[in-house]
Amino acid sequence: MTTSLESLSEELLVRIVSFTERLSLPSLALASRTMNRLVIPELYASIDFNRASSDTGVEFLIPLTYHLLNNPDLATLVRSLSIRDVFGSVEDDLIPLDEGGDNNFRKGWPSTADPKDIDALLRGAVGDVEDIEEGKAKLFNAVRDGSDEGSIIVILISKLPNLRSLDIVGGMTNAGRELLRFVQRVAKRKAPFDRNPVLTKLSDVLVSGWDEKYPNSPDLLGAYLELPSIRRLHGYQMGNNDQTKVTETMGALGTGSSPVEELELRASQLYGLDLDRVLKSCRNLKTFIYEVGHAWAWYPLRTSDIMNSMTAVEKALENLVLEHSEYVSDNAEDGEDSLTAVSLANFKELRCLNISALFLGGFKQNEKADLRSIFPASLETLHITHLGDPTFCVPWIPSALQQAIEHKDLVFPGLRKLTLQGAFLSHSYRLEEIKGLVHKAKELGIKTVILAGDGTGSRSWIDSDERGWGIDEEVKWKECWGNNAFDVATFDVEWDESGIRKTKITA
């Protein structure tokens, strides 16, 4: 007997929809009225634009905006929006639409609709985001003739009341200025958003740029921080090449004005005063992930700038990742307070710490330090990276860590997991350098994990999986150029009574 889709339970049909590839969803929606009803929420939940540029534009941006303006019930279904490619304006040499219609690269406002109806629809949408007549006229013209895609994006996202996740590329195009201005005004509750708030459910944002070489301006980062529902903010390749004053949006941040709970800055190097303003704005930051260093950030990097800024969050922070890219040493200045060791003893709520050996011992600072005083007593998990790397790890780090472990009851009585990461695959002799540390940790009942890499290449050039985001790198965003994961193996290492090392790869 033939079984039709209609004979299956709705619960099973929902599961079928959830496992269907996105490109097949439109076809599945045409199978029946029931399937259409079940597929539509899944189809509209995530919108992802591909293949755009500053001169050719985003092909279907205008048709989708028109469709959702005409169907606000469908707009309520959108939870996630991504425009990873760069968009443009006439100032960026965006190829004009042919008398408002299509060109060879992007679609215009529908020719089948009455122009008066389109005008009325757009004037209503513009009136919801602009309060001054001059501003309304300027925005309407830019949207109606399709000359500024940043303006169209503003109209689009202002009409997505349940938007929770946003990933729109910033960068060096003029079209981004309207988006920046919009986010700033929403965050500051400027009219008309004091009466008609938007983006009220936006909780997760990725700020990245389209340039593969230079760092990207952090101005949007500063604007997003004060959105009312922002909780997790991830930034990629943030910074400026040569900065001497605070970024305008950072300077506008108020103390304790941001509700963000997780802040991640990857392959980034914020100007010291920018970072200070950012962290002072966070009133309840629980997780801070800072992978510092960028090849083309040309101002000096100083550990003291980072640590001075972090005093603003030391009472609330529970999870901290303090890492660096392979470029970090390029920004160290000999003879100045640059890459020195840190102390985290005042971070009384810190439970999870992932830190490079560089920040424990400093950059090429060979005088051994006592690490027993730098850790907070609250620590439960400790992850050390770049162990044994002659560029980033001074030789005395393993023995100093062992000394701290030997005094576990005084240093961090709740420590239950220790992860040691280094280029042990290609430099197995480095395992001998951590032998005493591993022995002592296991003897004290601390779960000890060894992550071994091969120490080759930069993430910018190797062919590997996309690296996840967040404290456990489990958050998924669209691919960022150069955001590749290092391949590491999990080792189980034992030494027998005669000192012979036995190594087993467990994962």
Image (cartoon, grey):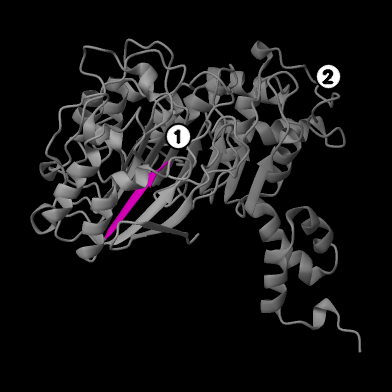
| Residue annotated with mark 2 | 99
Q: Is the residue 300 above or below the residue 464 in the image? A: above
Q: Residue at horizontal 56%, vertical 23%?
A: 176
Mark 2 element type: loop
| Residue annotated with mark 1 | 235
Q: Which quadrant of the structure image shows residue 238? A: top left
Task: Locate residue 51, reporting x and y percent.
Answer: 73, 32
Task: Locate residue 352, reporting x and y percent.
Answer: 28, 52
Give the amino acid type for the residue marked by disc 2 in the picture: Glu
Query: Is 61 positioned to the left or the right of 471 in the image?
Result: right
Q: Do the CB atoms of the residues marked 2 and 1 lie less than 8 Å apart?
A: no
Q: Is the residue 124 above or below the residue 74 in the image? A: above
Looking at the rendered structure, the number of numbered marks drawn on it comes to 2
Toward the left, the furthest residue is 410
| Residues drawn in magenta | 417-423
Query: Is 278 positioned to the left or the right of 136 in the image?
Result: left
Packing grade of label 2 (10 A; few <14, some 14-19, many >=20) is few
* Nearest to the observer: residue 198 or residue 14: 14
Give yes or no for residue 420 being in the magenta stretch. Answer: yes
Q: Residue at horizontal 61%, vertical 26%?
A: 151
The main secondary structure of the magenta stretch is strand
Sequence-wise first label, 2 or 1: 2
Packing grade of label 1 (10 A; few <14, some 14-19, many >=20) is many
Query: Is 248 positioned to the left or the right of 209 in the image?
Result: left
Q: Quadrant of the N terminus?
A: bottom right
Task: Locate residue 272, reporting x and y percent.
Answer: 28, 21
Q: Which quadrant of the structure image shows residue 314? A: top left
- Residue 230 in view of the camera: no
* Nearest to the observer: residue 419 or residue 250: 419
Q: Kindly identify which numbered label has been placed on residue 483.
A: none
| Mark toward the viewer: 2 or 1 | 1
Give yes or no for residue 165 being in the magenta stretch. Answer: no
